Image: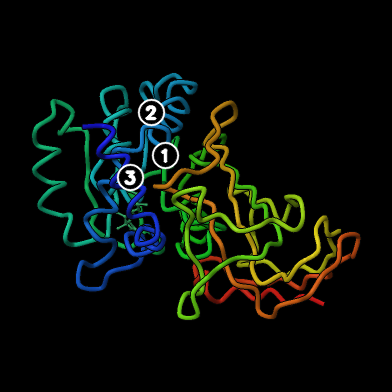
Amino acid sequence: MQDKLFEDIIDNYDTLKYSLLKAQTFDESHYGFPEIYYKIMETDKQRVDAFHKAFTLNNNFKGATVCEVGVGTLPLTKLYMPYVKKAYLIENNPDLVPFINKEIAKHPWADKVEVIYADALTVNLPEKVDFVVGELMSIYCANEFQVQIFQHMRTFLKPGGKLFPNRIVNFARLCEAEIDAEIHHYPVNFTRHQPMFLTQQFLVNEIELLKEKKQGVRLSFSVPVLFSGTVNALYLESYVEVTEGSNFTGTDSLMPPTVLKTTNTQEVKAGDLVHIDFSFDYGSSLDEISCVLS
Ligand SMILES: C[S@@+](CC[C@H](N)C(=O)[O-])C[C@H]1O[C@@H](n2cnc3c(N)ncnc32)[C@H](O)[C@@H]1O
């Protein structure tokens, strides 16, 4: 059975190249992500465990007042709810309302919850909280409003309060990718769909969510080339510190390494220095990242 499954995957490698892209693309008819994406996220043990470890490292939030934004199907919520004093749970996808209400009612902690169906960019809380949890991440924080939401939500933190996650570090490599004309970026699901790397990994920017004031990134820098070829894409990676001691470096469900076309292509030789002018706004679109090579 397992051999057959593996063989089926191998037979379908090519057709699966953009399936993760499809699963993670905003679906208007579903007021958000397709249902399959919630399944991919919920079943991703590595992603959920990174948050679980972070909650455990903080005494399981024992006796705390918590606000979680973008609760989705509640996989993170269930981990800390038994221990907290009170939780404000925020979600703005109307399709999830019946599920969330039904699910909460099943648990003995239901009376500690206040569900707020609202936009976390503008929501008001009736009191300050010890912790804000929010997993609304996308690679580089480009597609989702993780940064702007935390800029708003951190105003509701008590002194010494914490954000989960608290830090995101973005890396890139220049590469030569086989990427179809109509595709601008795709998350990598199988190593077979990785591009050829022409530089080593370099740091692009670091976002400390408690302090970040900027709305985006404007950078100009040079990187040395290791292999000759044609640069036509970036390979993006985001590493996340959920809390100090609990880190997450991306999986297929969340912040998968992503191949993104550069604004222009450039022939390079091993030993060259390539100059990059890089800019984008948080919460805009990956496809609006400008990466000009010279
Ligand atoms: C990446 S999913 C994570 C869901 C859940 N926290 C989990 O870990 O599985 C992000 C969730 O945030 C919700 N969301 C996105 N933007 C939001 C906003 N501005 N206000 C409230 N919820 C939002 C989405 O509808 C989605 O359910």
Q: Is residue 85 visible?
A: yes
Q: In the rendered structure, which disc, 1 or 2, sits on the residue that comes first in sequence?
A: 2
> Residue 12: percent from the left, percent from the top?
33, 55
Are dots 1 and 2 in contact, CB under 8 Å?
yes
> Residue 180: percent from the left, percent from the top?
49, 74
Q: Which residue is mark 2?
A: 64
Q: Nearer the viewer, residue 2 or 140?
A: 2
The answer for how far apart the CA atoms under marks 1 and 2 are is 8 Å
Q: Secondary structure at mark 3?
A: helix
Q: Amino acid at mark 1?
A: Val
Q: Which residue is mark 3?
A: 41
Q: Is residue 194 above or below residue 177?
A: above
The answer for how far apart the CA atoms under marks 3 and 2 are is 26 Å
Q: Amino acid at mark 2?
A: Ala
Q: In the rendered structure, which disc, 3 or 1, sits on the residue that comes first in sequence?
A: 3
Numbered label attached to residue 129 = 1
Q: Which quadrant: the N terminus?
A: top left
The part of the image, by quadrant, that contains residue 178 is: bottom right
> Residue 127: percent from the left, percent from the top?
37, 44
Q: Is residue 265 above or below residue 132?
A: below
Residue at mark 2: C-beta within 8 A of ligand 1: no
